[in-house]
Image (cartoon, coloured by chain):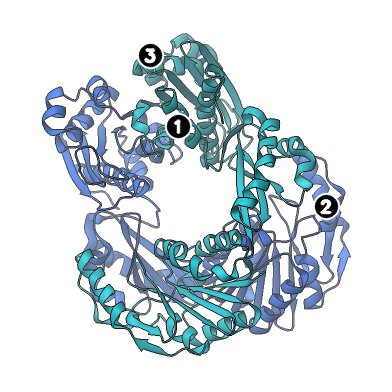
Chain colours: A blue, B cyan
Amino acid sequence: MAICEILSVGTEILLGDILNTNCRFLSRELASMGISVLRHTTVGDNPVRLAEAFNEALGRSDIVIATGGLGPTPDDITRDVCSKEFGFELEYNPGIMKTIEEYFVRAGRTMAPTNRRQAYAPKGGVIFPNLNGTAPGIGMKKDGKCVVLMPGPPYEMAPMFRQSVMPYLEEYRSGAIVSHEIRTIGIGESNMALVAGGMIDAENPSVAPYCKIGEAYLRVTAKAGTPEEADRLAQPVIEELKNRLGDYVYGIDVSCVEEALVPLLKKHSLTITCAESCTAGYIAKRITDIPGASEVFKLGMVTYANEIKAKFLGVSEDTLSQHGAVSEQTAAEMARGIRQAAGADIGISVTGFAGPGADEEGKAPGLIYVGLSAPDKEITEKIETGRNDREYNRYVAASRAMNLARKYILWRYPDNEQ
Amino acid sequence: MAICEILSVGTEILLGDILNTNCRFLSRELASMGISVLRHTTVGDNPVRLAEAFNEALGRSDIVIATGGLGPTPDDITRDVCSKEFGFELEYNPGIMKTIEEYFVRAGRTMAPTNRRQAYAPKGGVIFPNLNGTAPGIGMKKDGKCVVLMPGPPYEMAPMFRQSVMPYLEEYRSGAIVSHEIRTIGIGESNMALVAGGMIDAENPSVAPYCKIGEAYLRVTAKAGTPEEADRLAQPVIEELKNRLGDYVYGIDVSCVEEALVPLLKKHSLTITCAESCTAGYIAKRITDIPGASEVFKLGMVTYANEIKAKFLGVSEDTLSQHGAVSEQTAAEMARGIRQAAGADIGISVTGFAGPGADEEGKAPGLIYVGLSAPDKEITEKIETGRNDREYNRYVAASRAMNLARKYILWRYPDNEQ
């Protein structure tokens, strides 16, 4: 298995001005190629310390991938230092210059003279085009070792890696590692792990439980000679886990419940609407994060004040005074009221205390009711997150309300495949 | 100036399963203490490679701060490896054991026998209490060098660092570095830099331009013997930049326009409401991200469909058919309509194409209109982000609509201090 180290270059990272997301991206991509990442190192824009870190990394590994420090200014030193240390000489490349000039014309901007530096490339190296910026990437191979230099901005680096660097690293690939995520909602991490039982101890595919903002998920990882073989190993395990977890599972390889819900609504030509109190627009925002949501979503209301719940949703004064705004009854009437106002097939609602701190009546933050109304069914659910974290409580409440809609559709159309 | 290296321990980081945010947090905190961070290193849960990386870091620096690998399971090796390499012997500490047992009682959970490992601490070292978990932190000092071990989860590490580790590192503090951010909206990064002019070349305080999701900001950084002196150096520079940038500046050391807007609304006892098309709840969500927003925000509507804009906001059929939903006229009528429906002092609106891709009429993604309606003023603004990025366009549109409200209040009450 080939060994790789990732070297990030930039004083701004050491000052904490920017978060290093490149390492995570590259680590995941390299793992999927069966390349083993054993170290991440970050150094500043200092030639001596960069050369030191680069040579150490090169001594320990087959592949060194450096990001950052390919810009046009004098403190961008990665190209010069790494080429020199690896024994490659830089030469002026008119082809790169032309590409950079064209980039500036396309962007309607004037090129600074310093950009000429970016047209130097190592003799005998390979150039990786940059679709979103001026600095091309560089690949160099010698004595069985490989060095890749890429620009630091993630939106330049990531497409370059996928398009050019992955093929360049093909000879280091050792079989394939394929991962799939089984996303659940409504079941805790430990109970999910109990249901998965002995499958969690298996080696290949391995099954690992994780949790993330009120949801638990299982990652199934299989290793084999090719991605297809790895997938063949993973599939029966995924099927078995889906069977065991039933409708807790909202999707495979999706990242949130709205990614599962919107296609389900489209499939059955259903429209949805929402009345939100403590989530205050978060459901509407998340549903419409999915492009094309306008087919299924026409109206949403944020009804923060009691009088607004009464006026726009028809929540009765009695309900509000007897049970309070944060109650099952209010959630139910909100869902019904918004469904009727919007003329939608499904109405969902949220009312609760997101925190921080307790409400006036001393109810704990994280006490939330979600509701659903459809012509043939009404559901409410009580949530107690036990957390004093506004963003967490709002996210979880929005997810759970959308999950009511997902479960309703599965109940209404029992033949649905997850 | 003391030199520090940060060592992150965890195979999950090298696999890309989690994003390393600890490095950024620690780097910023250490910079504020005048401690120079020269390297970040991440290694997996492997004793040989951890010992190697730890000794290298110790050889190069005065302070090594390691995070991760203090948990109860056998792959948590940081405590053992680093204590041994630094020449400290571990001994069982009944005081720690008691604290861990109490933690489990408080959390209503049963302690696993493996948690006993966490009660071992280096003889002659210092224990840092963990308010949010079981693993205490550890400090060791010898021969002018200092080693700090902290747990990996950010919500355990960050409070421990601020409460216990900062005082422990006090002797390494060299003066103070203080940074302030001048946040602007509505002006581009390069124009902002032009206005700042020669101030950007100054050394102390230094002034550096940055940009972030459609906003530009200046970071003013001053170094001095104490934080108070550094602040005294920074203040006149901040004042001068505020004067030059005028009402583009929405706040100092705030992170988004809603953080400036909500206090301004509260100060003048004004209520706000919003009608959102392409941002679809993002404005409502962001306003109510600020705790206590319920004083100023009662109702928001997400009017995604044309018929909904007509029915609930009174946008005229003529306007929609003559100018289209994405137009200045529609934005103006939406703002007026929602203000009247909510009985609020200020109504704001957004209508536009967030993308991805062009709309049916071929209009470009990122073409957005925002509107404001108040009894004594109406404003609309056209935005062209030029980007095909749904999340970016929605964020920027929400910010710009909220900024209209901020500017209206400044116009209405000219004595406001930013």
The answer to whether A221 appears left or right of A62 in the picture is: left
On whether disc 1 and disc 2 are found on a single subunit, the reply is no
> Hey, which quadrant is residue B416 in on the image?
top right
Amino acid identity at mark 1? Pro
Q: Are marks 1 and 2 in contact (CB under 8 Å)?
A: no
Tag count: 3
Mark nearer the N terminus (3 vs 1): 1
What numbered label is drawn on residue A115? 2
* Residue sitting nearer the eye, B333 or A225: B333
- As measured in the structure, the alpha-carbon distance from the residue carrying label 1 to the one carrying label 2 is 45 Å
Amino acid identity at mark 2? Asn
Amino acid identity at mark 3? Gln
Discs 2/3, front:
3
Q: Chain of mark 3?
A: B
Q: Chain of mark 2?
A: A
On whether disc 2 and disc 3 are found on a single subunit, the reply is no
Secondary structure beneath disc 2? helix
Q: Chain of mark 1?
A: B
Badge 2 local density, few (<14 within 10 Å), some, or many (20+)?
A: some
The residue under label 1 is B263
- As measured in the structure, the alpha-carbon distance from the residue carrying label 2 to the one carrying label 3 is 54 Å
Quarter of the picture containing the N terminus of chain A is bottom right
* Residue sitting nearer the eye, B169 or A410: B169
What numbered label is drawn on residue B340? 3
